[in-house]
Amino acid sequence: MELRFDGQRVLVTGGSTGIGAAVVQAFGEAGARVAVHYNRSAEAAKEVLDGVTAAGADGLLVQGDLTQLGVPERVVQEVADQWGGLDILVNNAGDMVSRSKIEDASDELYEQIMALNLRQLFQCCRAVIPRMREGGGGAIVNVSSIAARNGGGDGAVLYATSKGAVSTLTRGLAKEVAGDNIRVNALAPGVIETLFHTRHTDAGKWDTMMGTIPLGRAGTPEECVAPTLLLASKDAGSFITGHMLEVNGGQLMP
């Protein structure tokens, strides 16, 4: 089955690099109108947008630091106002910020991680629900992590905690909005080759992680695309809600 999203209005947060960029491109190639959110990566975001328009799709850029109060609502509103609503929200923005053991973690680091991975995602969801309800329904895909289930690697406990909360929020919200024809699911990637690990994972940790993956390698952003589109699709994913879709090469099996 070819997944099509012709004319559907999509917002992907953190859409300028990594998984987000790959997802944006795929939505554009499938006929969607795609808003590429970014914070500091303006040049990369413009390249992603060029890929969308080259595919013959409508796209736009929207900038904002989602950790700042009021910005998530403004980003959602800006896109919804531009296109008269939103059909799909992919909450992809997030990061580990830095590795730290709990005993060494500062209150400031805790607040940064929670604001980036959890609070802004909650605020984006809160802002988009009324717009989706007005449009007769929609789909929200949150990006969680394998860390939500295994507690994370060395120095990643706070990150894992925030992603565990994302998974819980996904399940709870799915129940709340099911009656509005809004489906809420989450993608839970394992080790994916992105700037995330360039920033936070040294060669020793990387080699150790590779030894825990049955498929013997890391995944690619492109390998996260089809699972995301499945969860977003009102055709192929119409009876899926409250689900965590694991994409981890067998590193952690249900």
Image (tube, helix red, strand yellow):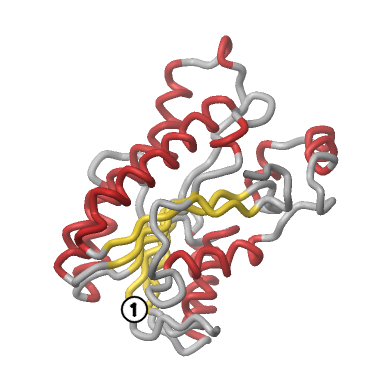
For the C terminus, the image quarter is top right
Which of the 4 image quadrants contains residue 139? bottom left
Report crowding for label 1: few under 14, some 14 to 19, many 20 or more residues within 10 A (C-alpha): some
Q: Residue at x 53, y 32 (%)?
A: 159
Task: Decide which of 244, 52 is in the foreground and name it.
Answer: 244
Amino acid at circle 1: Gln
Asked which secondary structure carries label 1, the reply is loop
Q: Which residue is mark 1?
A: 8
Residue 249 appears at what percent x and percent y? 73, 53
Query: Could you tell whether 196 is left or right of 209 in the image?
Result: left
- In the image, residue 21 above or below residue 202: below
Task: Decide which of 253, 2 is in the foreground and name it.
Answer: 253
For the N terminus, the image quarter is bottom right
Residue 27 appears at what percent x and percent y? 48, 75
Q: Residue at x 52, y 54 (%)?
A: 187
Q: Residue furthest toward the bottom?
A: 56
Query: Could you tell whether 23 is left or right of 199 in the image?
Result: left
Which of the 4 image quadrants contains residue 135? bottom left
- In the image, residue 192 above or below residue 122: below
Which of the 4 image quadrants contains residue 97? top right
Query: Could you tell whether 249 is left or right of 39 in the image?
Result: right
